[in-house]
Image: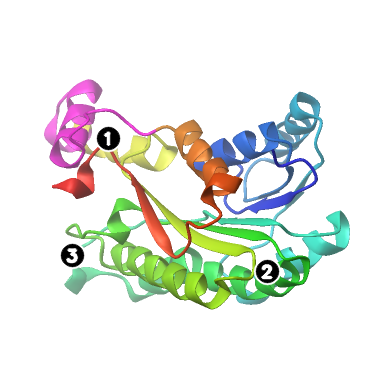
Amino acid sequence: MLKGKVAIVTGSTSGIGLGIARVLAGQGADIVLNGFGDAGEIEAIRSDLERAHGVRAVHDGADMSKGDAVRGLVAATVEKLGRIDILVNNAGIQFTAPVEEFSAAKWDAILAINLSAAFHGIAASVPPMKKQGWGRIINIASAHGLVGSVHKAAYVAAKHGLVGLTKVVGLETAGTGITANAVCPGWVLTPLVEKQIADIAARKKISRRDATMELLGEKQPSQTFVTPEQLGGTVAFLCSPAADQITGTSIAVDGAWTAQ
């Protein structure tokens, strides 16, 4: 379905981003991986994508906290691979604390990576997408883009901002062949969430299984984690002809979390 298309997936050397990159590669898209990590492991991921799916895959280690680097990632993609068709803004970081104790430096970092990076990537991608008359902008927001939780001031603010940015870009690009949508996952079993489970288990002196059920039970009625592959499937659907008129909206993939 996506043969000949080029997709950038930020924060894609692990977790949700890697799951999305694998699904898009499976649909035939050439992939630009982005993120930090062990160079050998990243090369193994890159070469595996090429071998398994017969696509081109490159890695760009652009720092998502720096606007110029984000714009440079888009420019380098067009230069190396000839085009940019799909931009998946997935890179994100997390930090929790009561608002009165929240580190200003952490606030700035979370806003930069979780929100401003998407703005810079979109601003750089829209012109070439308009020129070719087709583009898909998909922002990986969160259930926290739709509802709040305690101790997550910066994350919730950034993800709500990402949902708002999605609406504006959807309006501004309507009728151009470009769509912009947000995907809002609930709990996904990523290294970030694994750490939260471990913290709950240690703090409450309970088993990992009990800590997992406590985490899910508080928010996610399905009592089941969302998988990166399911999110990849949602992204692939948004890139399909069936989704040509879906734009400026948010799709919750959250086991009924935000239905409550």
Q: CA distance from mark 1 to mark 3?
A: 19 Å
Is residue 128 shown above or below 234? below
Please name the residue that numbered disc 2 is placed on: 125
The spot of residue 253 in percent (x, y) is 35, 42
Q: Residue at x 61, y 64 (%)?
A: 178
Prevailing SS of the magenta stretch: helix
Q: Please give the count of numbered marks on the rendered protein.
A: 3
Residue 75: tell me if it is visible.
Answer: yes
- Which residues lie in the magenta part? 202-226
| Image coordinates for residue 72, horizontal then vertical, percent | 74, 70
Disc 2 crowd rating (10 Å Cα; few below 14, some 14-19, many 20+) is many
Image disc number at residue 59: none
Residue 256 painted magenta? no
Give the distance between the C-alpha atoms of the residues marked 3 and 2, in whole angstroms.
36 Å
In the image, which disc is placed on residue 98?
3
Task: Judge by depth and name the residue closer to the eye, 207 or 120.
Answer: 120
Q: Nearer the viewer, residue 25 or 2?
A: 2
Hey, which quadrant is residue 70 in on the image? bottom right
> Residue 209's x, y, as percent?
23, 21
Residue on which the image places disc 1 = 197
